[in-house]
Amino acid sequence: MIKTRFAPSPTGRMHVGNLRTALYSYLIARHENGSFMLRIEDTDQERFVEGALDIIYDTLREAGLHHDEGPDIDGGVGPYVQSERCRMGIYRKYAEELIKKGAAYYCFCTKERLESLKQEGSEEEYGRYDKHCLSLTPEEVEEKLKSGIPYVIRLNVPEEGTTSFHDEIYGDITVDNSELDDMILIKSDGFPTYNFANVVDDHLMGITHVVRGNEYLSSSPKYNILYHAFGWEVPVYVHCPLITDENHKKLSKRSGHSSFGDLIDQGFLPEAVVNFVALLGWSPADNSEIKSLAELEAEFDYRRIGKSPAVFDVNKLRWMNGEYIKAMDDARFEELAAPYIHEYVADESRIPAVCAMVKSRIEVLPDIAGQIDFLKAVPDYEVSLYKHKKMKTDEALSREVLKKVIPVLEAAEDFSNDALYQTLLAFAAEAGLKNGQVMWPIRTALSGKAMTPGGATQLLEVIGREESLRRLHAAVAKLSAEAG
Ligand code: GLU
């Protein structure tokens, strides 16, 4: 059975890249009726951020990526938090096993020595450790350990030969061992490095498919050396392509929309974000873009993940979010939109009508403000707004029409959109006017805007009889004043 994991480090924000890793891991598992696990990788204590665990749990929940096991759901291979595993001595035990096999060794070199190695090192050796401590005798090691000299444990990479590995996306990759560093497995603070802990844990926890960003691709040969040294089976690797911003630079905090939290704060819906993120590097066989999570689960074939960088196009996300809003049922839309409407519409009973007006016209919920700000007060506007070629009207005609239409509206019994529409059509016909010659001045008088989310009668209903008439009178006064 397939088993995948999401293994975030609690460092704060949920970067879009991390969310994609979580999503792809989840989808690979669900697609094959496998299992999806959550592991917390908190061995880098310096990077730990308070509250980051909540962000991880909240994001997975909001995105609908339910895990089958993890710190909060025991699946029998816990603990699922690496610092707890560390305290139990799990990593040390495995590091010592490697030392016994000659695949790892203690290193007591000081920071200063390592620094000077870097400075002196020839170009190609730059930054690589020179295996100095590998030549210590067992007795020397024993003595140094006893006297409490700080140490790390390093992988003993063979100096000759090559290491190959297979990645499902990037294919077969072979590197010369001489290019690989004797990476640190256990740090001087006793914690394992990511490089060591991920291998030990993925094996002990039965992970079959490792999904992660391609920044880990170049380290994968070293992981394979570890798997081979232990005699463990290497998992299937799925490294995902880079995500860039619109300028083809690595998506970073500076873009303003690089984390799940940023996107939610900007009014994007979790389901639209999930759909969008699924397409950052993967494409469905049918090329249709709107896919629910259930559809993604059914269709996700990781072999269709691409190698080339995926561009985060925020306009595409906006479009997609708009599609999700249009498809949403009205009750949910009202619930989500109400907080954005309250500022402009005090009367609670008008909210459904406002929602009906804006639902198909926005891409994100905060767009609502720009659509309905005039409901609160008519902005200052130029009377030239009444001039409209296509509607065959201008300031003078508008003023005449408004004057005549006010008593009709005052007398209207039913002030609903549909009834008013019929009333005004009848009025236009009787007065020998085109519909636009009646509707345009009303809409302008009520909104002070050339573009509104609804037509004249919709606005009348939403604004209500009393305030509408007040606005129409004010418009006549304004037109009269301008006409002199
Ligand atoms: N803890 C690593 C990170 O957050 C996980 C990488 C992996 O998935 O193996 O980047």
Image (spheres, helix red, strand yellow):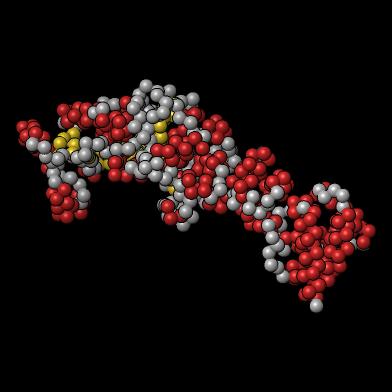
| Left or right: 437 in relation to 450 | right
**Which percent across, then down, holds residue 167?**
38, 37
Residue located 17% across and 55% down the image: 119
Q: Residue furthest bottom?
A: 484
| Left or right: 165 in relation to 383 | left
Residue nearest the viewer, comparing 62 with 380: 380
The N terminus lies in quadrant: top left
| Left or right: 179 in relation to 136 | right
The C terminus lies in quadrant: bottom right
> Where 131 falls versus 474 (above or below)?
above
**Which percent across, then down, holds residue 476?**
81, 67
**Which percent across, then down, holds residue 91?**
25, 30
The part of the image, by quadrant, that contains residue 480 is bottom right
> Where 451 falls versus 176 (above or below)?
below
The part of the image, by quadrant, that contains residue 16 is top left
**Which percent across, then down, holds residue 409?**
85, 56
